[in-house]
Image: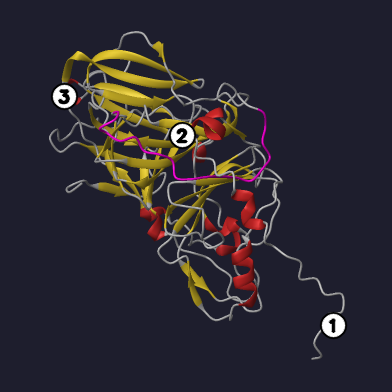
Amino acid sequence: MAGLKYMTGFGNEFSSEDPRCPGSLPEGQNSPQVCPYGLYAEQLSGSAFTCPRPANKRSWLYRILPSVKHKPFTAVPCGNLTENWNEVEPDPNQLRWLPFIIPKPTEKKVDFVAGLHTICGAGDAKTRNGIGIHVYTCNTSMVDRCFSNSDGDFLIVPQQGEVLITTEFGKMMVEPNEICVIQQGMRFSVDVFGETRGYILEVYGAHFELPDLGPIGANGLANPRDFLCPVAWYEDRKVPSGYTVINKYQGKLFACQQDFSPFNVVAWHGNYTPCKYNLKNFMVINCVAFDHADPSIFTVLTAKSTKPGVAIADFVIFPPRWGVADNTFRPPYYHRNCMSEFMGLIKGHYEAKEEGFLPGGGSLHSMMTPHGPDADCFEKNSTAELKPERVAEGTMAFMFESSFSMAVTKWGLQTCQRLDKTYYQCWEPLRSHFNPNWKPRKQ
């Protein structure tokens, strides 16, 4: 959207005020007896007050009316959004979905919230420890409706169609090949411009952060300067017919009514903010001698668990890069993993499975379920001339990886009718190359 401005950085102490109201941020304190312009001061805390300073997350919002002014919340239908991980029996098979269907606007108008569908997940929002993976398929903008998630953070990955996200902190335009993070408790509304689809990684009990770099050093992967945070923007708009605030709480949806827009924050400051990031800015680390490194080198954001080195969830991408490893099978290796791996495709063809894995679809390789290149990929790359080559050009695949053993919902296994029941067949042509008479070459 032309004219949108952003501030740069990840987890910074930001401050912003709408230029229509200069001086709206109080000077020297957070909660004066009377705020500038007659505003209300309201703190949004994303962490316990007593968290160590590096982990303490909070922002102060200066708004025309406080968010507490609303009618009582009442339960509303959840549609295909769920935290019920016991709807169907567990399925340890390799699972792959064809592109999820976007409803036609001529058939039914569906906005972002109505278009949320849970594919899989694990854990519990009540105990603040878990994960949910969703897809959104919608065709119309939210009108006098906003959404807030009391359960956790949303990492949104648009796949088709840009989304204009209005938050209490300002506006963000997020296009395919960009991501955005809307943290717990932040109210937002989504405008779309046609048939729209994307993926969502939800985490309970932790916030997304940049991964530690270790021996990589101070620079690399997703650099903080490339994250963009919105600037303050407000509307002083009365809605006599009723503005609906939808709240996800303990896995269920609730709605309340108020007679004004919630996007009435004139100024704000703090380090608890939404943000967006363009995946093209990712600084890729890769093998330059031999072997195939673990996909953790492609981690953009992580939500850490209390166990060192183990994530509730990692967001990993497979961007365009050079492949130069010598004497090496360059695609991903065959693997069984103590983590669960959900993969999606924003555009192009994934290098290890060029057929069947399509943009807007997905796959799930559950804990300790074998997976790896299909037969065509193995044969091709076992005999290929090993010269420097561009890998994944014009492609962007990603992975939501989690230490949780995820359950697939009834919608994911049955209702959506997008499960590819032929997926296992991509490995059926694999044949034995074993030769008991093989001898090493003489040096």
First in sequence: mark 1 or mark 2? Answer: 2
Cα separation between marks 1 and 3:
79 Å
Between marks 1 and 2 in the image, the one whose residue lies nearer the viewer: 1
Horizontal side of residue 216 vs 309, given as left or right: left
* Tag 1 secondary structure: loop
On screen, residue 441 above or below 262? below
Judge whether residue 30 is colored magenta: no
Outermost right residue: 437
Residue situated in front as seen by the camera: 129 or 106: 106
First in sequence: mark 1 or mark 3? Answer: 3
First in sequence: mark 3 or mark 2? Answer: 2
Q: Which residue is mark 3?
A: 236
Cα separation between marks 1 and 2:
55 Å
On screen, residue 46 above or below 295? above
Which portion, as a residue range, is magenta? Answer: 89-108
Q: Which residue is mark 1?
A: 439
Res. 211 in view: yes
Residue ID at (50%, 36%): 417
How many residues crowd around disc 3 within 10 Å: few (fewer than 14), some, or many (20 or more)? some
Q: Which residue is mark 2?
A: 153
Q: Give the total number of marks visible in the rendering.
A: 3
Outermost bottom residue: 443
Between marks 1 and 3 in the image, the one whose residue lies nearer the viewer: 1
Q: Within the image, what quadrant is residue 278 found in?
A: bottom left
Horizontal side of residue 395 vs 352, given as left or right: left
